[in-house]
Amino acid sequence: MSQSFNILKQPKPFYLIFFIELWERFGYYGLQALLSLYLVQSLGLDEDDAFITFGAFSALVFGFVSVGGFIGDNLFGTKRTMVLGALVMMAGYLMMAFSKNDQSIVYLALGVIAVGNGLFKANPASLLAKCYEEGDSRLDGAFTLYYMSINIGSFISMTMVPYIADYFGWGMGFLVSAIGLFIAVSNYFLMRHWVSDYGSKPDFSPVSLKIHVLLYAAIIIACGCSALVLNYLMMANILLAVVGTGALIKFIKEILVAKGHDRRKMIVVLVLMLEAVVFFVMYMQMPTSLNFFAIQNVQPVLLGITINPVTFQSLNPFWIMVASPIFAWLYNRTEQDGHGLSMPGKFALGMLCTSLSFLVLPIAAKFADDLGVVSSSWLVLSYLFQAMGELLISGLGLAMIAQLVPSRLHGFIMGIWFLTSSAASVIAGHVAGMTALDDDEVLTALDTLPIYSDFFTRMGVISLGVAILMMLFARKLHRMIVEE
């Protein structure tokens, strides 16, 4: 029985990083819970434009992460970059809170948040990876619990923030996100001595005035450019293509430079990242098409209590919190016994779970009532499968990089991992637009049900095809990892 608690026996720095990530994600997912609905209901965008704008914003959010990882590894230090990113994000949330629905200010605020997130996001995970010796059996469990911190923060904010926005207005809903960042930064400064011995090389030496000036100037320029591309979405796609292509070329160059076993492991990383693009397209349906399906076609009742349908999004982090300790314990137990599922096998199983999360919804449509409304139990089941898929793919993505990539590239390749989310976000915004309703039409739940049912069927079949393909190649990829 004591073995089941081994997953909690992590080094002290783990707990500091856990709580920083928890509060930072509290802020970000508070914004995510509201954003697409805010764009439609408050700024007056059509649903398809709102989905595409949300996708472009998400692309910027993740697109800057590889840059933030590089800055943390090579210029400013992992810890300094993490704190700077949190402060920039906090400024963006404050701008959202006091924008008074001015679209130009909203887009500038979103640009600031995207840049701040890019500076922050890769660095806590990179710092965490540096706290473990190579081959430490606790690593998969540590990253699974770390991933749980993300979902504790998102569960609290996705549950609270829609009600706060309902009762006190959009501005107060966004202000809560700024408060989350303030707590994250305060928590770090109170306990930073726990990570005094860890970090990237620049963390242990002074940063020159020149680097400070150039970095702050680049942040200001990046915020302005991000606001501009949100006003001109084609520019966002071009920017993502340029950044993504450059990062991919750099990654392929590193693969070619590597030799033997290291090269084979990095090829596996590239393959799993391509699979992750498909997963993130599916995952990003949660704040867009799946959110609007819940509003239009799902009975807003859980355990006999009527709820705000926007808070159905909190089912995802709820299931993550429930399942994370179980998965971490399973990884710890099976890998110590030598019977653990390989990393490619976990990714393939995760894609199968993702497929099931969509395929249960067309089944739900067949049991809809006479008004075209389905029981919330089906959405609970869908989010359960989605959470399992997320833990097996997104939750292990960072651990996969920590295990398979040379430590000197951790920050950069973790940034590339988040860049897969960026590419997927643009695709996901356009894909979600397939369910967008014409504002000139008055449609009932009976009208929208077949639209969503057909869409979710297609998403389920596509992800099922990818899952089968990955299962066929999982053993081959595993051999590439383990054979010297």
Image (cartoon, grey):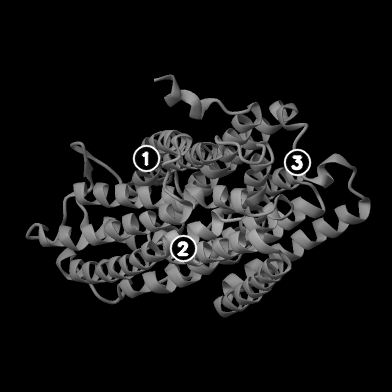
Residue 294, quarter of picture: bottom left
Depicted 253 relative to depicted 183: above or below: below
Total count of labels: 3
Q: Which of 312 and 249 is in front in this view?
A: 249
Question: Of circles 1 and 2, which is in front?
Answer: 2
Question: Of circles 1 and 3, which is in front?
Answer: 3
Residue 380 in view here = yes
Residue at the far top: name it.
2
Rendered location of residue 167, percent (x, y): 39, 42
Q: In this view, does 116 lie to the left or right of 140?
A: right
Q: Which amino acid does label 3 sit on?
A: Gly
Mark 1–mark 2 distance (CA, rounded to whole Å): 35 Å
Q: Nearer the viewer, residue 142 or 39?
A: 142
**Circle number at residue 318:** 1
Residue 163, quarter of picture: top left
Q: Is mark 1 on a helix, strand or loop?
A: helix
Rendered location of residue 271, percent (x, y): 52, 66
Mark 3 crowdedness (10 Å alpha carbons): few <14, some 14-19, many ≥20: many
Task: Please tell me which of labels 2 and 3 falls first in the chain.
Answer: 3
Mark 2–mark 3 distance (CA, rounded to whole Å): 35 Å
Residue on which disc 2 sits: 476
Name the residue at 37% across, 44% down: 314
Q: What element carries label 3?
A: loop
Q: What element carries label 2?
A: helix
Q: Which amino acid does label 2 sit on?
A: Lys
Task: Please tell me which of labels 1 and 3 falls first in the chain.
Answer: 3
Residue on which disc 3 sits: 199
Is disc 2 in contact with disc 3, using a CB cutoff of under 8 Å? no
